[in-house]
C-alpha cells in the first residue's frame, strides 16, 4: 500500500514522466556484500562503510569541484573501507569486488512495475549517479532496456545528486516540465534533492525504515513499484 505522509500531497494528475534512481532502487546494492564475503572475514561493516563513503565522496565532490565517475568513487571508497578494517587485498581482488556493481540483482517488482507504467502512458527514465558504462551494464543485467525511454547520468554534467542542477538537467533531457516529473528513489538524499528541484518525490521504502527527521517528507511512500502504479491510477 502506498502511504501519503500527513501534510504532503502526491498529485497524480500532474505526473507525465517518471524517473527512477538505480542503485538501491532498481538494483540491490546490499548484494555487494556477497562479493566481499569470499575475501573478508566480517564483510558487513566493510560493506556498510564502503557504501557510506561512496555517497559521502559524491556529496563532497559536488562542493569542492572534485568530480570523478561514480565507478571511481566506488573504487576509492572500497579502498578506504578495506584499509579502515585492516584488510589488505591486491588490486586484482579489489577490481573483482568492484565489478559486482555491473551485475547487481534487480528487485523482483521492477520489471512489471515499469512495464505497467509504460503501458499506462508514462515515460520511464533512469536518473542516476552511475556513469554511463555502469548504467549500460545495470540496464542490461536488469533486462529493462526495452522499457526505458533513456538513462540520464550524473556524468553528463559532472555533478551528483542531490544537486538541483542534475534534476534540472534530467527534466530538460526528458523534455518534461520539472513539476510533471515523479522521481522514484530509495535514497533519502535523492528524495530531498528531487523535491528541492521541483519534482514530486516518491520514496521506495522496501524495508519499513524510518524516514529522516530532517529535510521534509516525501510526497509519496511506496513499498513496491505496484504501489506507484496504483497511486497513478493505473
Ligand atoms: O548509489 C547511489 O545511491 C547513487 O547512485 P544512484 O543515483 O543511481 O542511486
Image (cartoon, helix red, strand yellow):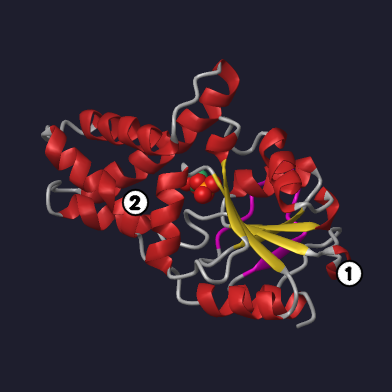
Please tell me in which quadrant of the rendered image residue 1 appears.
Answer: bottom right
Between residue 228 and residue 218, name the one nearer to us. 228
The local crowd at label 1, few if under 14, some if 14 to 19, many if 20 or more residues have their Cα within 10 Å, is: few
Span shown in magenta:
209-222
Cα distance in 3D space between marks 1 and 2: 36 Å
Q: Position of 120 compared to 153: left or right?
A: right
Q: Nearer the viewer, residue 218 or 181?
A: 181
Quadrant location of the C terminus in the rendered image: bottom right
Image marks 1 and 2: residues in contact by CB distance under 8 Å: no
Q: Give residue 154's position: percent from left, percent from top.
A: 56, 39
Q: Residue at x 64, y 54 (%)?
A: 211
Name the residue carrying label 2.
Answer: 101
State whether the magenta stretch is mostly helix, strand or loop.
loop
Q: Residue furthest top?
A: 64
Residue 13's disc number:
1
Where's residue 6, x and y in %?
82, 62
Amino acid at each position: 500500500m502506498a502511504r501519503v505522509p500527513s501534510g504532503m500531497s502526491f498529485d497524480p494528475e500532474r505526473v507525465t514522466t517518471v524517473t527512477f534512481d538505480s542503485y538501491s532502487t532498481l538494483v540491490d546494492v546490499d548484494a555487494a556484500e556477497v562479493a566481499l564475503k569470499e575475501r573478508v572475514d566480517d564483510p558487513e561493516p566493510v560493506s556498510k562503510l564502503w557504501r557510506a563513503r561512496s555517497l559521502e565522496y559524491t556529496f563532497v565532490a559536488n562542493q569542492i569541484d572534485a568530480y570523478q565517475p561514480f565507478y571511481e568513487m566506488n573504487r576509492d571508497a572500497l579502498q578506504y573501507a578495506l584499509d579502515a578494517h585492516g584488510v589488505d587485498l591486491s588490486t586484482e581482488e579489489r577490481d573483482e569486488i568492484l565489478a559486482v556493481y555491473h551485475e547487481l540483482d534487480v528487485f523482483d517488482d521492477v520489471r512489471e512495475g515499469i512495464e505497467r507504467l509504460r503501458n499506462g502512458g508514462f515515460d520511464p527514465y533512469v536518473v542516476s549517479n552511475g556513469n554511463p558504462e555502469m548504467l549500460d551494464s545495470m540496464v542490461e543485467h536488469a533486462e529493462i532496456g526495452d522499457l526505458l525511454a533513456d538513462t540520464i547520468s550524473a556524468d553528463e554534467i559532472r555533478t551528483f545528486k542531490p544537486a538541483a542542477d542534475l534534476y534540472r538537467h534530467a527534466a530538460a533531457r526528458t523534455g518534461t516540465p520539472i513539476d510533471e516529473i515523479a522521481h522514484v528513489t530509495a535514497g533519502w538524499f535523492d528524495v530531498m534533492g528531487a523535491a528541492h528541484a521541483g519534482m514530486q518525490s516518491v520514496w521506495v521504502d522496501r524495508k519499513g525504515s524510518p524516514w529522516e527527521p530532517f529535510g521534509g517528507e516525501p510526497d509519496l511512500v511506496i513499498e513496491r513499484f505496484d504501489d506507484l502504479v496504483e497511486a497513478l491510477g493505473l
